[in-house]
Image (tube, rainbow, N blue to C red):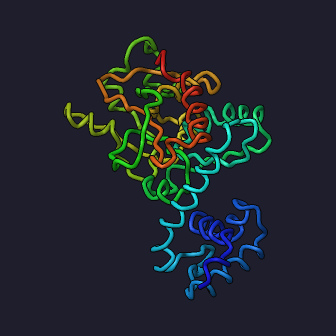
Amino acid sequence: MNFAAFDLNLLRVFDALMRERSATRAGEQVGLSQPAVSAALNRLRDLLDDRLFVRQGNEMLPTPRAETIAPGIQDALQSLQRLLESERSFSPEKLERSFTLMGADLFSTLFANQLMARFTQISDGLSLRFLDTARGDVQRLLTDDAIDLALEPRLETPEWIASEELFPSPFKIIISPTHNKVQDLDLSKPLPIEVFCALRWGLRSVNGSRRGLIDDTLEKIGRQRRVVLTMPHFASLTHCVEDGDLAAVVPAQFAIAYAKPLGLAVFDLPFDAPVTPIMMHWHSRRTRDPAHIWLRQQVFDLCAQFRDGY
């Protein structure tokens, strides 16, 4: 292969295909049409003598050769981007970039609109994508540059993942105030443990498991509850509580935001439960990226509203 004649734009297409697994979505990332992406891929296949990506259903799956060279190509492109960005002063008003965040709908429902409003005010070139927690493994997605930030509880992560705490997230109970087991109770006091264990419960669960942190805590004090519903999102779970005879334990910030609009009662837990620290995680190669620093600051500032009073 004559590297002197190699078109480096082909590597941008390759990197986008590795992240998106779709010629259409890859084209959106690099500003090319789907046919142009396919043409670039065919050129790469000829140059590297490998198919690189094989279609399986709606996905373009990388071959072993593609998996092998992908990290080096990704690092080279990012090093070049940092080098070029360092040659000029950073200005968010000039940003033309799509940022991708992953987390529970706690974030997409409580502050995505505020973050997007900031983007709109600052630059027409900014766009935002939110992915659900169920999308996949945080480490892999950060390694593949498929996401910029993972908004998750504290994780056991390798050294190359950087983290910063956004806010502590204690739990609250939400339930209809007309439920026959709570309608005469004082909302300023914790829900009695006997009532807690007698209720039917809904649980936010990404994988469908009927057991969560609260159940582990109950077990330690010799109690248990009955979980009759699991939902993948806090918002849908909250609407099931509103319309049914269920109770749910949700993050305090979420409970307080939804209690008044939906007419729900909010109780404190009748036992001590661990307070979950909510973090933002990112790949350390992005730590000094000016645009990424700016993004992290926007998220951190917006999460100030969730740090006190819960």
In front of the other: 292 or 274: 292
Q: Judge whether 306 appears above or below 104 on screen.
A: above
Q: Is residue 1 left or right of residue 160?
A: right
Q: Is 59 drawn above or below residue 221 in the view shown?
A: below
Residue 83 relative to residue 270: left or right:
right
Q: How many marks?
A: 0
Residue 147 picture location, percent across and down: 55, 52
User: Which residue is depicted at the point 27% across and 39% down?
Assistant: 216
Residue 54, how many percent across, how many down? 57, 81
Q: Is residue 143 left or right of residue 50?
A: left
* Residue 71: percent from left, percent from top: 48, 65
Name the quadrant containing residue 122. Answer: top right
| Front-lying residue, 230 or 43 | 43
63 or 202, which lies in front?
Answer: 63
Name which residue lies at 56% across and 41% down. 105
At a point 56% along the width and 43% down the height, the residue shown is 289
User: Looking at the picture, does residue 204 appear above or below residue 49?
Assistant: above
Check the image and report above or below for 5 versus 79.
Answer: below
- Residue 270, given in percent of the width and then of the height, sits at 32, 22
Q: Quadrant of the N terminus?
A: bottom right
**Which image quarter: residue 293?**
top right
Relative placement, left or right, of 65 versus 13 is: left
Q: At 71% from the left edge and 45% from the top edge, which residue is drawn?
A: 127
